[in-house]
Image: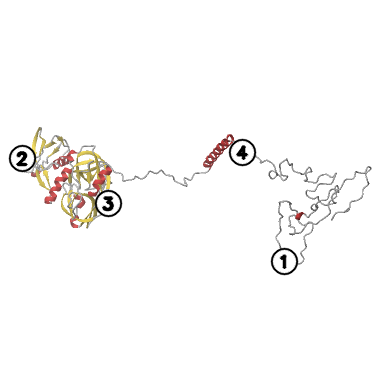
Amino acid sequence: MSHDGAAPAEPTEPPATPPAPVPAPPPGPAPAALFAAPSSYRRTGADEPVAAPLRPGPPDAGEQPPGPFARPGAPAPVGAPARPGPPPMFGAPPAFGAPPAFGAPPAFGAPPAFGAPGGPGAPDVRPGQRADGDGPGPGAPPRRRRSLSVAWVAPLVVLALAAGFLGGLAGGRALPDDGRRADAGLPTIPAPAAPVDRAPESVAGIAAAVLPSVVSLEVTTADGGGSGSGFVLRQDGYVLTNNHVVAGASEGSLVVQFADGTELPGTVVGATGDYDLAVVKVDATGLQPLALGDSDAVVVGDPVVAIGAPLGLVGTVTTGIVSALNRPVVAGDGDSTDTAFINAIQTDAAINPGNSGGPLVNAQGEVVGINSAIAQLPGRLTGVGSIGLGFAIPSNQARRTAEQLIETGRATYPVIGVVLDPEYVGEGVRVYEQGEQSVRSGGPADLAGIRRGDIILAIDGRPVTASEELIVTIRAREVGDTVVLRVRTGQDEREVRVRLQASPSD
């Protein structure tokens, strides 16, 4: 018998013992063809055939229908039925050169085909498993998925974190740090719900109370200009400052600038170079004046605050303490009539050029001094700024002088009526020996019996060692006060009482 496309089998010699006849299988439906073209292989059953896209219209000229051995993977014609053929004979071997059909049992006595069950290359299929190995077969119980226990997960997590930390540490050491961060992460503090109140006796509280009354003054003259500080003395426009701040303003212009920025022209009411004080008037009312405190109540170590406009920086506040009292300070050029003799309060609060005329206040915000001078290093012709040695005119002296300037436009200072010898070196100070006017006739010293050449050793029990010291001590008193002087005439020492007289200020 021949099969479609198979060569006829060659005759063989019959065996010695003929085999028993095998009954023919019962008739049934014809199986699928054994030798379909590889490109037309499709699974049967529930698998749907893969249809190639239909080509519209008749095939192009010269196009040939696919042959029985199309290239693997080429689609078969849609709707092309498998070529029918006779059923295979049981035990008949496959045709020479033809590949075995998929799923067809081998001929009796022939070895299993490659990939067939039991044959070479067949997968190891266990019961309940699909032949292709892709999941369980029909009727098999569901496969149980394995999971790691907590005893394994926890060490693995710890190991992963440790590895990440060590890796980051190693990377950070291996790569240079440029200092830049994605987020600066600076610490912050919550904003206060309401403004924070400062204690009135704190520096902030003192500054808040005093600053509205502090002014700056700008003077312009033909020779140039200058600036200084001052403060409101009365609510109707009187301002107190230093004489050297407003010097020359009568030939130029004077502008007073207040804390709120208001600028008003000012006029000098009165000034004195002997005390380095001046009163300026502006056309304004309702100003906030500062109270003048008692400078005699100040002691060394008291906290003080200096406020002014150093170098034109309006509203500058510095703090310090009272470093010393009764410092004899001679401010200005000693050869001029504007030389001031001040029995000053010394402070370490920073005072710089431009602070002149500004207030020095105590912890209650009361003015105890008017900033007037700073010490400068020896050998320097001009000041270099604060070196921690600032000097202020005592407020008691400022009060007396300001009252005189407002009332009369002039100020007076007390004297004893003698001229002192600046060349004398020795204990105390000596009255000048030359000239008839070294002891003014009829003056306080003459009436007390002091003569030319006498040595004054002390005033009110306090020793004096320099002429300036005696002068500033006397000028710190009031006209009409009586002082006690210890005087030496030759080898005779005695104490005399001297009543101070007034001398008009230049």
| Amino acid type assigned to the residue bearing label 2 in the image | Leu
The CA span between labels 4 and 3 is 81 Å
The reply to whether the C-beta atoms of the residues labelled 1 and 3 are less than 8 Å apart is no
Q: Position of residue 453 (x, y in %)?
A: 10, 38
Given this view, does label 4 or label 3 mark the residue nearer the observer?
A: 4
| Amino acid type assigned to the residue bearing label 1 in the image | Gly
Q: Is residue 248 left or right of residue 127?
A: left
Q: Residue at x 80, y 50 (%)?
A: 101
Pointer 2 local density, CA inside 10 Å: few below 14, some 14–19, many at least 20? some
Inspect this view and state whether residue 376 appears.
Answer: no
Q: Secondary structure at mark 3?
A: helix
Q: Position of residue 227 (x, y in %)?
A: 24, 52
The reply to whether the C-beta atoms of the residues labelled 4 and 1 are less than 8 Å apart is no
Q: Which is nearer the N-term, disc 4 or disc 3? A: 4
Which residue is identified by label 4?
147
Question: Is residue 166 depicted above or below 104 in this figure?
Answer: above
Question: Is residue 169 depicted above or below 26 in this figure?
Answer: above
The CA span between labels 4 and 1 is 59 Å
The CA span between labels 2 and 4 is 122 Å
Q: Position of residue 108 (x, y in %)?
A: 85, 45
Q: Secondary structure at mark 4?
A: loop
Q: Which is nearer the N-term, disc 2 or disc 1? A: 1
Q: Which mark is residue 447?
A: 2
Q: Residue at x 44, y 44 (%)?
A: 185
Q: Which mark is residue 312?
A: 3
Q: Residue at x 54, y 38 (%)?
A: 161
- Nearest the viewer among 265 and 71 is 71
Which residue is identified by label 1?
57
Q: Secondary structure at mark 1?
A: loop
Question: Is residue 282 depicted above or below 180 in this figure?
Answer: below
Pointer 1 local density, CA inside 10 Å: few below 14, some 14–19, many at least 20? few
- Nearest the viewer among 264 and 348 is 264
